[in-house]
Amino acid sequence: MRRAACSIQAGSSETGSDMSESVRFRFNVDGSNFTTAGQASVQVKKNLRELGIPADAIRRVSIAMYEGEINMVIHAHGGEAEVIVFEDRIEIILSDRGPGIPNIELAMKEGYSTAPDNIRSLGFGAGMGLPNMKRYTDDMKIETELGKGTTITMTVRF
Amino acid sequence: MKISDIKTLLDAEVVCGEENLDHDVYSACGSDMMSDVLAYVKDQAVLLTGLVNSQVIRTAEMMDMVCIVFVRSKKPTEDMIELARESGIVLMNTEKRMYEACGLLYTSGLVGNGVRHE
């Protein structure tokens, strides 16, 4: 079975004022195969457990990232995922070069979905992805440009 | 109840995770939409579903579930079984349909609470 490519780095935070040590995980999300979607999230969950992160934070990060990964595969032919672990929070950055989101307000409505029917037959595409990502995280920022791609940054504090 | 009680109540066949049948479980949910499981389920340990693909196993793993029951005799694939083994999730299947399987477990004390109400 093909695995999500993962690289792990430890180093200083790059957020300027916050100089705490951070650990980063990077993944390429393969957009060609729905069956393998979610591998990066499963790996992140394992990595966070090994780091001793509180269980509730692990769960919230895992679910939000999993929804994001599924979205990237359904809508954007995959992309890149980065998870940065700080002393008091975890940041998840999902970037793709997909079609972009034409109407973010609409996309954030529960039940609104542009996923094709075949995705619904696989158990997804109920229009819960983005709302769910927002629900499980403390902060979510969406940057999107039509025809260029989307970057979603989420923060889970613990 | 224990996972072994679910096996008995549903006359189910255990596909993998036999070693975890002693695990205690208190609540369950039934759905074919993994989107809904990710959105509305909270702290349920058992998932009943008629959907068969790898995302069922990953969804259960994300939600910290410990047992998946496939209804209507649906059989998980080898890939799914491998994923479940890696995560220590019990897989079983039953001939019963979703409604009947959920009803049998519910009336035997496996509740559905924990679902988020807003």
Image (cartoon, coloured by chain):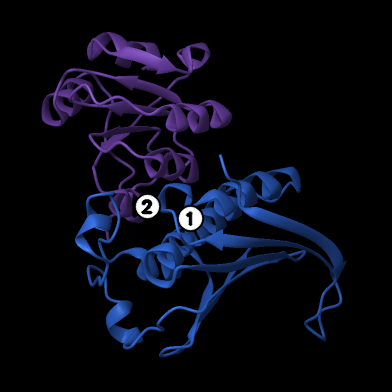
Chain colours: A blue, B purple
Residue A150 versus residue A157 in the image, above or below: below
* Disc 1 target residue: A63
* Disc 2 target residue: B38
What's the residue at 17%, 20% (across, down)? B104
- Quadrant in the picture for the N terminus of chain A: top right
- Quadrant in the picture for the C terminus of chain A: bottom right
Residue B22 versus residue B64 in the image, above or below: above
Q: Chain of mark 2?
A: B
Residue B19 versus residue A154 in the image, above or below: above
- How would you rate the neighbour count of disc 2 (Cα within 10 Å): few for under 14, some for 14-19, many for 20 or more? many
Residue B55 versus residue B90 in the image, above or below: below
Residue A107 percent coordinates (x, y):
31, 78
Label pair 2/1, CB-CB below 8 angstroms? yes
- Which of the numbered marks, if any, corresponds to residue B93? none
| Residue A55 is at least partly visible in this image | yes
Residue A151 percent coordinates (x, y):
53, 80
- Cα–Cα span, label 2 and label 1: 7 Å
Amino acid carrying mark 2 in the image: Leu
Residue B96 percent coordinates (x, y):
15, 20
Amino acid carrying mark 1 in the image: Ile
